[in-house]
């Protein structure tokens, strides 16, 4: 099955913007990042382009490896929970999903080279940062939905002049949705009708409708970084990163018919869809930090596009219950497709000021060109030209702002706070908002041999989504609240 057919199938069911804009939504979601990793990086809002000195900061700006003075090992276990509050036809619903994970783990080696001109040290680091979590769950419910998913199927068949012969599971693109409804008699084709149209079994009255979504998985960046310290003023670094994506998306649409609707014998039905996207990507990070005075630091970094080779597996099922019959059940074959995704270019500029031994403040400006996302078929060399046109039409470059501060309470204990504002990647042509805000706090204990950091992060975001054809249904809106707690254990040697 061509992925074009898959996206068409999904587009009939879940509209994030409009029928033409479904494809860039998945590409965008797989390309985004957030502030994760070590507890110190999280606590200070990820504003480390000009700072360095922390393991996860190496992924933000590899020049930060040159700031480190000693070998160290660190690991960051984390707890993340996502709470959703959805509104659909004036009815609210709440859901949640939680998981434990490893936010970062890695080792840094520093070699003193004071005897080579003004070069003070060279460094190497290897490890992993969890750059994005896909974990979330939400649902829409309505006791008075004015239309049905089957109405959307029926309209598609009529508008395209399709008949029963087009609904063979072997013939795409309908084998993953409309054909299942046909097999379960949710759609039928009257034999004794001259101007034949497909019969719709969902009746004529408003129905009870629910849409339940569960997402899981993550994007993890494993990197090998090199850097150096020149005269304690200039720090340079670069890294090769290997990104792994594992994304699971499952949803169920369920509808039940009003018992007083005598035009049908259908009681209820459900449609379920499941997909897994997984694969690897590779890219480069380059960066520099300059310290014009003992207090002031400025930094810049460049993250090249990551080129992913991804595989998607997907399947769907349909169950229908009529009066006086056993339940009807149909399932699709398992679909499989390989494609290439190229993430956008990212650049970051930062400035930090260190108040001696009392603390510091830091600020970053990050630019991400989402219109540079590219897709290409591997299984069948499909060009994705229409999908890339949608990317250019509905997406826009964004600017992300990050701020962080650290105050040394005692010689060994520090308090931290941070804020990050991620811009909306959708332009004015899109009926959605993809920006979000991060608020964070943290504490840290450090001595010459080990360190212990803890952080709490609050994320607020929102989403607008159509279950199917926007011409037939209102959008559901969801407010998401994410809580992330991370603890970093580190040892210097």
Image (cartoon, helix red, strand yellow):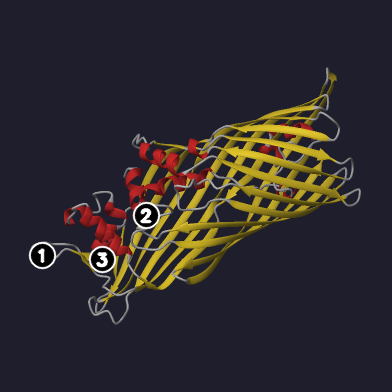
Q: In the image, 334: left or right of 282?
A: left
The residue located at (76%, 52%) in the rendering is: 417
Read off the residue under disc 1: 191
Q: Position of residue 399 (x, y in %)?
A: 60, 41
Q: Is residue 254 above or below residue 242?
A: below
The quarter of the picture where residue 128 lies is top right
The residue located at (35%, 44%) in the rendering is: 3
Q: Is residue 372 above or below residue 447?
A: above
Q: Secondary structure at mark 3?
A: loop
**Outermost residue, right direction?**
411
Q: Position of residue 197 (x, y in %)?
A: 17, 62
**Outermost residue, front direction?**
428
Q: Earlier in the sequence, mark 3 or mark 2?
A: 3
Residue 127 in sight: no
Tell which tag, 2 or 1, sits nearer the viewer: 1
Q: The N terminus appears in which quarter of the rendering?
A: top left
Q: The C terminus appears in which quarter of the rendering?
A: top right
Name the disc covering residue 315, or none: 2
Q: Position of residue 366 (x, y in %)?
A: 63, 39
Q: In the image, 22: left or right of 138?
A: left
């Amino acid at each position: 099955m061509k992925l074009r057919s898959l996206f068409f199938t999904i587009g009939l069911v879940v509209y994030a913007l409009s029928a033409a804009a479904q494809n860039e939504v998945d590409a965008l979601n797989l390309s985004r990042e957030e502030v994760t990793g070590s507890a110190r990086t999280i606590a200070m809002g990820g504003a480390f382009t000009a700072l360095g000195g922390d393991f996860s900061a190496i992924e933000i700006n590899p020049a930060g490896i040159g700031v480190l003075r000693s070998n160290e090992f660190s690991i960051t276990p984390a707890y993340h929970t996502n709470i959703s509050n959805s509104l659909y036809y004036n009815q609210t619903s709440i859901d949640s999903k939680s998981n434990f994970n490893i936010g970062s783990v890695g080792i840094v080696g520093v070699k003193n080279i004071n005897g080579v001109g003004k070069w003070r040290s060279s460094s190497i680091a290897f490890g992993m940062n969890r750059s994005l979590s896909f974990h979330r769950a939400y649902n829409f419910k309505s006791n008075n939905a004015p239309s049905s998913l089957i109405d959307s199927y029926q309209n598609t068949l009529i508008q395209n002049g399709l008949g029963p012969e087009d609904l063979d599971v072997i013939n795409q693109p309908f084998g993953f949705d409309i054909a299942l409804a046909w097999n379960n008699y949710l759609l039928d084709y009257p034999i004794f009708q001259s101007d034949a149209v497909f019969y719709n079994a969902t009746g004529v009255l408003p129905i009870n409708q629910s849409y339940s979504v569960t997402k899981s998985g993550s994007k993890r960046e494993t990197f090998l970084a090199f850097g150096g310290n020149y005269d304690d003023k200039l720090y340079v670094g670069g890294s090769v990163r290997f990104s792994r994506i594992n994304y699971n998306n499952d949803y169920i649409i369920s509808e039940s018919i009003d018992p007083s609707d005598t035009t049908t014998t259908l009681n209820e039905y459900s449609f379920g869809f499941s997909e897994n996207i997984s694969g690897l990507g590779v890219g480069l990070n380059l960066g520099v930090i300059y310290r014009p005075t003992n207090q002031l630091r400025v930094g810049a970094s460049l993250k090249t596009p990551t080129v992913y080779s991804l595989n998607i597996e997907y399947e769907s099922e349909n169950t229908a219950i009529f009066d006086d019959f056993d339940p009807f059940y149909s399932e699709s074959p398992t679909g499989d497709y390989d494609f290439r995704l190229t993430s956008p270019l990212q650049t970051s500029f930062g400035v930090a000021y260190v108040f001696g031994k009392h603390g510091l403040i830091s600020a970053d400006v990050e630019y991400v060109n989402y219109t540079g996302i590219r897709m290409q078929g591997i299984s069948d060399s499909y060009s994705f030209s229409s999908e890339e046109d949608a990317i250019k039409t509905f997406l826009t470059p964004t600017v992300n702002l990050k701020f962080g501060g650290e105050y040394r309470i005692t010689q060994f204990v520090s308090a931290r706070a941070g804020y990050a504002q991620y811009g909306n990647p959708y332009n004015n042509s899109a009926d959605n908002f993809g920006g979000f805000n991060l608020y964070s706090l943290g504490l840290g204990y450090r001595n010459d041999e080990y360190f212990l950091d803890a952080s709490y992060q609050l994320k607020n975001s929102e989403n607008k989504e159509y279950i199917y054809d926007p011409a037939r249904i209102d959008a559901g809106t969801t407010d998401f609240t994410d809580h992330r707690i991370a603890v970093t254990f580190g040892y210097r040697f």
